[in-house]
Amino acid sequence: MKKIKRREFINKACPKIAMALIGFSFLEACSKDSDDLMLDESIKLEENAGYTVNGKIIEIDLLHPTFSNINSEGWMNFTAQKILLVKTGSSYSAFNNSCPHQGVRSKWTYNSSERTFLCGQHNNSYPTDCESQGTNGGPLQCYTISKLGNTLTVTKP
């Protein structure tokens, strides 16, 4: 457990939570008391998650441990932002992680030799060329990618 001051946690978390929640119980939690709060380290505040979001633009720190699968396995399902990421050699690709068949987001595997994603829901495969149809449904939706140093920028349409 990482110990942070309650006021610091409130200043970072409350504005984001306020947009998602409505109710008086939440307002009471954002009081001006300055006592300390224990925060489980598995709860990632945005600056510690290895990425930032600004509208439709996601900037990813490729050296952050959250993204270690990209380098070790060549791909990852970045579920927090609903993106499939692939590294082929020194280039990267990004796709919407919604299966074109039925919208499943969490059952993907990647076949690097065939450069296809396989949705485990119904075993449909989808090429990563952004044009070819999958075995059931259209192509995966591609996102624009750019890389500068160790920062990967994904731009959603």
Image (cartoon, grey):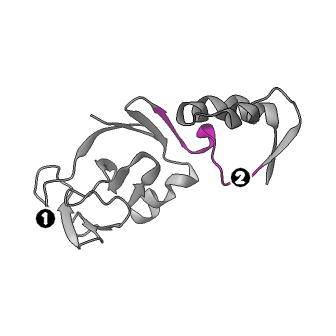
**For residue 65, side relative to residue 93 (left or right):** right
Sequence order check: which comes first, mark 2 or mark 1? 2
Depth check, front residue: 84 or 105: 105
Q: Nearer the viewer, mark 2 or mark 1?
A: 1
Report the residue at 71% width, 52% height from top. Answer: 41
Amino acid carrying label 2: it is Glu
To which quarter of the image does residue 34 belong? top right
57 or 21: nearer the viewer: 21
Q: Position of residue 101 (x, y in %)?
A: 19, 60
Contact between marks 2 and 1 (CB within 8 A): the answer is: no
- Quarter of the image where the C terminus is located: top left
**Res 46 quadrant in image:** top right
On the image, the x and y values in percent for residue 99 come to 25, 58
Q: Is residue 149 visible?
A: no
What are the residue bounds of the magenta stretch? 39-53
Furthest-right residue in this view: 35
> Could you tell me which residue is drawn at 27 percent across and 41 percent down?
143
Residue on which disc 1 sits: 136
- The residues bearing labels 2 and 1 have C-alpha atoms spaced at a distance of 41 Å
Instruction: Return the x and y of residue 29 as percentages of the image width and height.
Output: 75, 36
Residue at which label 2 appears: 41
Dot 2: element: loop
Looking at the image, the residue that sits furthest to the front is: 24
| Dot 1: element | loop
Residue 118, percent across and down? 26, 68
Is 89 situated left or right of 55 in this image?
left
Callout 1 amino acid: Asn
Q: Is residue 131 left or right of residue 17?
A: left
Q: Is residue 146 above or below residue 15?
A: below
Q: Residue furthest left?
A: 132
- Closest to the observer: 107 or 86? 107
Any magenta on residue 50? Answer: yes
